[in-house]
Amino acid sequence: MGEVIELFEDYEEDVANEIHLTEPQTQLMLTDVKFPLFVAGFGSGKSQAMVVNALNDLFNFKGANVALYAPTYDLLKLIVMQYVEEILTNGNFDFKLNSSEHIFYVTGYGKIICRSMDNAGRIVGYETFRGHCDEMDILGEAKARMAWQKIIARNRQKIYKLDEYGRRIPQIDSTGDFVFLNGRQQFKTEMNKVSAYTTPEGFGFAYKRWVKEDDPKGHYKMVRATTYSNEHNLPEDYIETLRASYPAELIDAYLLGKFVNLTSGQVYRRFDRILNSSKESVKNSEHIHVGMDFNIEHGAAVIHVLRNGDQEAHAVDEIFDSYDTDDTIRILNERYPNNLITIYPDATGVKRSSSNGAPTATDISKLRIAGYNIEVDYSNPLIKDRVNCVNARILNGLDERKYFVAIDACPNTVETLESQAWDGNGVPDKKSGLDHIGDALGYFVAKVFPIVRQNAGFIRTTSRIR
């Protein structure tokens, strides 16, 4: 375990609030560079490290404006601001939260300015002494870079170094004389600093800025925190749950805090036609589960059955290049007239029809009229999340395989899982025509076997009697 950091110098005599920091969190707090990055696995205390460092800046540099940034205002309000308010309340600090401005005014110290990074154009109209940016890589590279440039441009508030009597310390040149600029005496200032915090999401902005790009002045330094560094504060099954939930290739990123390539090469790189093969088929009138993608002349559906306590999905049949939704319905009814059928469709089918003529009903309405059960959300999951769900079933971090394919019955499904690659934009390639089957099975897997990110929560502050 790392150090116990006493954040509040002006505590009441009988109570001192403490934060127990892990070794990586302590290392971050002691890092003396302008732009440190805390790259961290899930549950490693990343957001807590950000809030603790921000409050430490506020308490040690009176009059400072300290900014906290998150990818969206929802994340800012639901996580970061709540924890700031908890620490200030537990520490008996006199503060006021202006909810409309998202600013904490802390009497006798300074301000904590909370802002979203998703619209960099709104990062205007204030100056900061220190800034702290959560989940930089969630934004995507272009948005993250623009937000970063805006944030460091705002980081120009001067906080002067003070001597033991609270007086400013003057600048002195090499001859021992006081330094003046335009007739005004110059004083030493504390270092302005902006810290970033992220879970590694491929080789995005954080990797390029802190690892790949030139840093001639040595302003950029990275501190890595693994999930294991905070293990003593996590639920006993937290790490095992992550390993069971995520594909094997993401474990390095989400447990060890390492940058890994998520968007090149084969999309479903752990699929093995032998190890992931199935000899299952539809039995009598059993319940079948159909992932479906809508397209004119390229409709796709993958038919699944569940086995082993409904924990294994077996793709046992496919419909490839059907003309439209009506054609897919006809084929399903011919092949499975006596089966209960649940469809997991492309969510965009709520709003459109794949019919070549004037639409009389949406694709999903047609499926309901046909008598199928429909499982669909208002919108599709993110492509990255859908692919991760499929890969986690193909092979998870515990070396378990829970998605299988009947090789002879599903040749296009096998070809997609073996051959589909990422394109130059970091999305599954569409030029090969393999995307429709991949989308279809992905809608089913993401709905029935979603990756549920277990929230480790914040480590709470503790109190002790002096």
Image (spheres, rainbow, N blue to C red):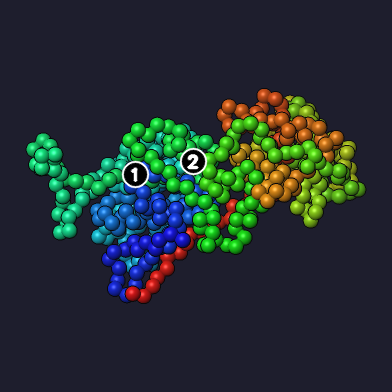
Q: Mark 1 or mark 2, which is nearer to you?
A: 1
206 lies left or right of 256: left
Kind of residue at badge 2 = Asp
Q: Residue at x 70, y 45 (%)?
A: 395
Res 430 visible: yes
Q: Residues within 10 Å of mark 1 (few under 14, many from 20)?
A: some
- Count how many numbered circles sit on residues in the image: 2
Which one is earlier in the sequence, the residue at label 1 or at label 2?
1
- Residue named by callout 2: 137
Q: Secondary structure at mark 1?
A: loop
Kind of residue at badge 1 = Val
Q: Residue at x 72, y 49 (%)?
A: 400
Report the Cα–Cα distance between label 1 and label 2: 21 Å
Locate residue 171: give its quadrant. Answer: top left
Q: Position of residue 386 (x, y in %)?
A: 65, 41
Q: Residue furthest front?
A: 175
226 lies left or right of 81: right
Q: Position of residue 284 (x, y in %)?
A: 91, 48
Res 184 visible: no
Which image quarter is the C terminus in? bottom left
Q: In the depicted view, which residue is nearer to us: 238 or 72?
A: 238
- Residue 33 badge: 1
Locate residue 3: give its quadrant. Answer: bottom left
* Disc 1 to disc 2: CB gap under 8 Å: no
Q: Position of residue 324 (x, y in %)?
A: 76, 30
Q: Secondary structure at mark 2?
A: helix
Image height of 457 relative to 65, above or below: below
Q: In the depicted view, which residue is nearer to us: 316 or 331?
A: 316
